[in-house]
Structure formats: C-alpha cells, structure tokens
Image (cartoon, rainbow, N blue to C red):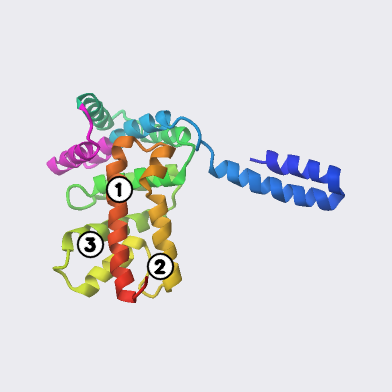
C-alpha cells in the first residue's frame, strides 16, 4: 500500500513545505505498514476458515497418495486431526470427501494453494500453520518419502516460504516428536538439544535471543489470533497443543539456563 505515503506527503507539504512533506511521508508510511499488517483483522474470517478447511484435507489427501498408495497410518493421521477438531458428522463427511478428492490424479495442487493463499490474504502465520500440519501428515507413516518431500517443497514455495524455512520447520517437527515422546526417560542433554531445535535456535544462542525466539513462536501459534485470521475454530485445539509443546520446550531451556 502507498496511499498513506502519498497523502501524508501531500498534506505535509501543504502545512510545512519540503520538510513537512518528508515528515508526512514518514507518518503515511507508518500508516501503510499498519494497514497492511492488520489487513482483514476486522473482516469476516468465515471465508478464510472454509478455504483453510477445504484446502487442508485436499492437500493432505494429495500427500498421502504421493508414493502411490495411502497407508493406514496416513488415514489415521487424517482421522486424528478430524477427532482433534471435534467435527460433527456433516463436517467429518466433508473432510473425508476433500481428502479423497486430493488423492485423485487430476487434483491441481498449485491451483488449490494459490486460491487458499489469495483468500487468506497471505497472512504468514496462518500459512505456516497450514504448512506445519502438512509436514505432520507427510511423517504420518513414520518417515518422509522423497515424493512427499518434493510436494512439501512445492507447497512451501507456492505459499511463499523458502527452502531454508521449510527445513527449519521439518527439523522442529522431528524434535517436537522426540521431545513429546521422550518425557524424562532420555538423557537430559538429548532432551535439551531437542528443546532448542523445537524453538529453532542453537545451544549457544544468547539468553535474550532465546526469549525472543520463544515469544515469537508463541505469538505465531496463538490460537485466538489464528482463528481471528481464518483458522477454523475446530482447529483451535491443534493450535493449543502446538503452543503447549513450545511452552514445554521453553521450560526445559529456561530451567537449564536459570532464567525467569
């Protein structure tokens, strides 16, 4: 958006000459940034929620069929998400229909992703949540096949994430799996290493940057914020569980470093 800068500069020049124009342009730029970041904040999230729901299960079905067949684990992953979302009978039937459509040879992945991104106004945290769920779907059968990795790379590219960011999310997911399953039964140093990876930081990261990374992740996965931007309300439980995993990893790091 540029209208804030243009109007700000115009009014600034009228009342303060060239210096006023510069100041007005700066104020207008600030307005443009705020308007851009808050775009859709006050709109109706229902169209985005519907598109998220549809695209989620379409793409999940496409990933499940990536290696030529759909495993029982992949079907169970889809069912688990449906249970977590507490879908009623009608919504469950829709989710199953979308999942099956995504498995069809004629399914157009790029078109589905571009439509979802457009309807969601490119809200990055929402797109990232979508990508994170698809990563979980790809790992449903215990590992990730090359065909599934290629699809994830395509999803990431179309949604606007680079390869480095995708790899970071994949590594974080694997660390979350180990961290969630290990409890206190593993070596504390291994658990600590997984906690750092969940937050996407190194063990040598300064305290203030550790806190910053933790707060950023918590903000990105804040259930209420995501729902307001278009996350289906049924998926709030999924977002809450993600936040709890981040919180648990932070607690391990915080205690190790003696942070408050």
Height in image: 48 above or below 202?
above
187 on left or right of 127: left
Helix, strand or loop status at disc 2:
helix
Instruction: Say if residue 142 shows up in the picture.
Output: yes
Q: Residue pushed farthest front?
A: 260
The mark total stands at 3
Helix, strand or loop status at disc 1:
helix
**Image disc number at residue 240:** 1
Q: Quadrant of the N terminus?
A: top right
Picture coordinates of residue 47, whole percent (x, y): 42, 28
Picture coordinates of residue 78, whole percent (x, y): 21, 38
Q: Residue pushed farthest top?
A: 90
15 on left or right of 93: right
- Which residue, given by chain and number where applicable, does mark 2 sit on? 210
Q: Earlier in the sequence, mark 2 or mark 3?
A: 3
Helix, strand or loop status at disc 3:
helix
Instruction: Say if residue 154 shows up in the picture.
Output: no
Q: Earlier in the sequence, mark 2 or mark 1?
A: 2
Residue 67 lies in the magenta stretch: yes
Residue 228 lies in the magenta stretch: no
Picture coordinates of residue 121, whole percent (x, y): 49, 37
Q: CA distance from mark 2 to mark 3?
A: 18 Å
Instruction: Tell me where the magenta segment starts and ends, as one range.
Output: 60-88
């Amino acid at each position: 958006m540029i209208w804030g800068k243009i109007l700000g500069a115009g009014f600034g020049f009228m009342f303060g000459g060239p210096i006023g124009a510069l100041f007005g342009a700066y104020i207008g730029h600030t307005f443009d940034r705020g308007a851009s970041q808050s775009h859709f904040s006050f709109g109706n999230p229902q169209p985005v929620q519907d598109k998220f729901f549809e695209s989620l299960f379409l793409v999940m079905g496409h990933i499940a069929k990536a290696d030529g067949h759909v495993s029982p684990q992949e079907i169970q992953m889809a069912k688990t998400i449906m249970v977590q979302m507490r879908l009623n009978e009608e919504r469950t039937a829709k989710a199953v229909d979308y999942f099956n459509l995504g498995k069809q040879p004629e399914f157009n992945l790029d078109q589905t992703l571009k439509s979802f991104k457009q309807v969601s106004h490119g809200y990055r945290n929402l797109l990232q949540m979508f990508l994170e769920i698809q990563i979980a779907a790809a790992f449903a059968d215990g590992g990730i096949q090359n065909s599934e990795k290629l699809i994830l790379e395509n999803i990431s590219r179309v949604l606007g994430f680079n390869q480095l960011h995708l790899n970071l999310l994949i590594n974080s997911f694997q660390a979350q799996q180990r961290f969630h399953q290990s409890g206190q039964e593993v070596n504390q140093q291994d658990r600590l290493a997984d906690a750092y990876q969940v937050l996407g930081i190194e063990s040598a990261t300064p305290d203030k940057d550790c806190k910053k990374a933790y707060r950023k992740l918590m903000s990105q996965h804040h259930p209420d914020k995501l729902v307001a931007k278009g996350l289906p309300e049924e998926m709030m439980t999924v977002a809450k569980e993600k936040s709890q995993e981040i919180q648990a990893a932070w607690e391990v790091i915080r205690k190790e470093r003696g942070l408050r």
